[in-house]
Amino acid sequence: MEGRICYHDQRARCSYGGRGLTWSLNMEQSALKRRFVSVNGNRPSWLPSWLPGGSDDRDSEQDTDETAPDKSAPEVLSVAAVNLDIRSNVLRHHTAEFDITDAAVYDEREFLVARRGQPFTVIITFNRKYDPGADDLRFVFQFGSRPLPTKGTHVEFILSADDVKGEWGGWISGEADNALTVEITTPPTAFVGKWSMKIDVVKRSDTSINVYRYEHKDPIYILFNPWFKEDGVFMKDEHLLNEYILNETGKIYSGDYKRISPKPWVFGQFTGDVLDCCLYLLDKSVKDQARGDPVVVSRAISKQVNSNDDGGVMAGNWSGKYTGGTSPLDWTGSVAILEQFYKTKTTVKFGQCWVFSGLVTTVCRALGIPARSVTNFASAHDTDGSITYDFHYDAELKPLKEYDDSVCAYIWKVVLRQYTPQETSGGVYCMGPMSLRAIKEGNVNLPYDGPFVFAEVNADRVDWFLGKDGAIERKQVVKNSVGMFISTKRAFGRATWREMQHGDPDREDVTNQYKFEEGSEEERAAIRQASKFSKRTDVYETTAEVKTHMPTKYCICAVTDVKLSVVSDPDTFMGNDIKLTVTLENTGQERRTCNGTLVLGSMYYTGVFHRELLSRKISAVELVPGQTKSMEYSVPATQYLDDLADHCLCNISCVCIVKETRQHCVIRDELRLRKPRLKIKAPNAAKVGDSFSVQVSFENPLPVTLTQCELRVEGPGIQKPVVYAQNNIDVKKMFLGTFKMTPVKVGAKEIVVYFNCRQISAITTSHPVTVA
């Protein structure tokens, strides 16, 4: 019999008591001569419940007796109730804002959400006073669909006399009457997710052991802990944590580099079912034993928010046609998207880059990984691995759009130096994490996705021209047209003068975190380092070119004495005429003759050309030495309104060739038409449970009636996402919308409102409210 478990002599009884399920197990003494070591390795423990014949093995050959154990005997200790002290624990763990920790918010759920590496308190009430000399307690924590000690998903430990650090454990911190206060610790590498908790009361005698098991009915959520130094996501700066973990609202910057516009966004990481949805995404994509690694988890998040590979959260759509779904511009935040996905388990339609950025930021913040949304203006999309972005022109100087890389105002989410995917990585649509320092220094060979990310922030623009004989020539390399005004919402401090030029005091310019100053020796060294891993070797200067004294921009011609500029008004509103001024200046000592082409077109924010709005030839412009000539062009609103894409972005392309020298002058620029701003009237302070009114307004700037109008409203702790239909708005008429809101949580909150209609989307505003 020694070393074997005697199933035929086992007696298992179960009874329901307190808030959980209690199991009683009686075994023959000879079966206990074999001892087992607990998971944390501190000391031998009793028979583990995960083995066949243990207290969790309810399918083994057992004679069952449903009679409850005799609790009247004074020597038998049993658990009457367990209090997870949620209100106190969540405050210490920075998780009190999760709706699911408070039964008074939206629904009756009240769960413990804790952060790994940090103790949480459990108060256990017994049927009598606990006797440490006679009563033994064992805690069992389990995670995943098939908990196993070998995978670290089944953990057992007994109470210790002292604080246990860096591993699973527990110690008694207080005792009063029949109640015992226990501090439970988890390791800083604990798997992130929902853990179950069981408490075994073990009663030993000379001939038998009785195990009375209490199973807590609610899961305990364990998250990453950026406040704990030993956790891989640790962040020292409390100001950054307040923004990158705790702030439920923020701004995502859009527009173009000449006029940067903040778009209010509700991340809502603490709202409703958002945390459960985040953990469901991990259940789908990450093995249980990898759920403690923030790199693995963040990479999985990047993959799961898009639907390209395995039915993730959101389907991307850049076509401008959104039948069967919601326009990406209409979303006010992440909550409605994640809750719809969690409820239906079906991909939500539709999103674009800033929506994916908002989603990933939400998921990371909910799980405890610091994250922010970052916009890179003039972001290159390198499609061929050249670590440049290339533009092509035909013999008539018109752009060959089908061959071009794209350049856009591109929005990332940044978490552990990670970005949102535009291309596959390892065969799936995800990106990163990638070291920010490696990107800055051009070390693109490091994982993950270095060449693509480097090109986004620091590629050189290369202009290629197709000759009439079919040969293609490189005419110009422009060094400073990519990676401008990289922007994120400021976590703390005041904006610099340069940042305030764009009008938003919350915007932080983080360009110098991603690249050295344009034109500096360090920046060019980073370019040279990155180009070592380029798939093209014919872009940068060679020894032969240096010997021919090529100009610094590497133009093929040796004389570059004509300057070309194109000026547009960045304050042009939708409904106004678009005006362009093309200027040619002869800075040389000889007469010059210029011919060229000007093309204005609407484009998607990804940089993809949509429709041509204007095309004009520039023919035989004669310039004497020192002379400047300007040409003005105009496109009326009635001509362009129906041809705009979602973001009201226009692409300007102007190419001129100097007849005498064959100098090629190329200007590529963009213009974003401004939208009216939504004005808001709302109180600055409110009280939980007391309704208040909000009023929003703007004037219709278009020469057409606005139809299919709606207001989308939300505010964490005040209002879950809601849509209010509105009446049509006539030409040049004032819109006025009113609605009520009722706060459910105290603290500093923010209201976010979007106005959308068929003709124009995402007229936005936000307003702070302090709730008492």
Image (spheres, rainbow, N blue to C red):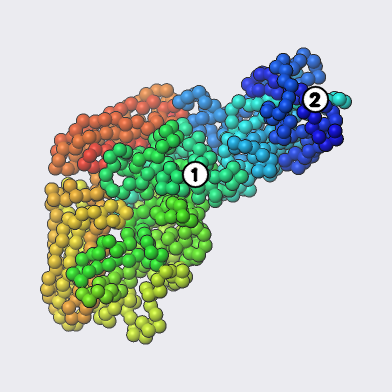
Residue 632's place in the image compared with 147, above or below, is below
Q: How many marks?
A: 2
Relative image position of residue 146 (x, y in whole percent): 62, 37
Residue 65's place in the image compared with 132, above or below, is above
Checking the image for residue 9, the label placed there is 2
Q: Nearer the viewer, residue 749 or 445?
A: 445
Relative image position of residue 553 (x, y in whole percent): 32, 74
Q: Is residue 130 visible?
A: no
Relative image position of residue 145 (x, y in whole percent): 59, 36
The disc, 1 or 2, on the residue closer to the chain's N-terminal end is: 2
Quadrant, the N terminus:
top right
- Which residue is pictured at 22% across the width and 39% down the height? 758
Locate residue 325: give its quadrant.
top left
- Kind of element beneath mark 2: helix
- Which residue is pictured at 47% across the width and 61% down the height? 450
Apparent side of residue 413 relative to residue 671 in the rendered image (left or right): right
Furthest toward the bottom, the residue is: 547
Apparent side of residue 413 relative to residue 230 in the rendered image (left or right): left
Q: Is residue 19 visible?
A: yes
Residue that mark 1 sits on: 364
Query: Could you tell me the amino acid type at mark 1?
Result: Cys
- Which residue is pictured at 38% across the width and 41% down the height? 265
Furthest toward the right, the residue is: 206
- Kind of element beneath mark 1: helix
Q: Nearer the viewer, residue 592 or 398?
A: 398
Q: Nearer the viewer, residue 707 or 484?
A: 707
The residue carrying pointer 2 sits among few (fewer than 14), some (14 to 19) or many (20 or more) residues within 10 Å by Cα, namely: some
Query: Could you tell me the amino acid type at mark 2?
Result: Asp
Quadrant, the C terminus:
top left
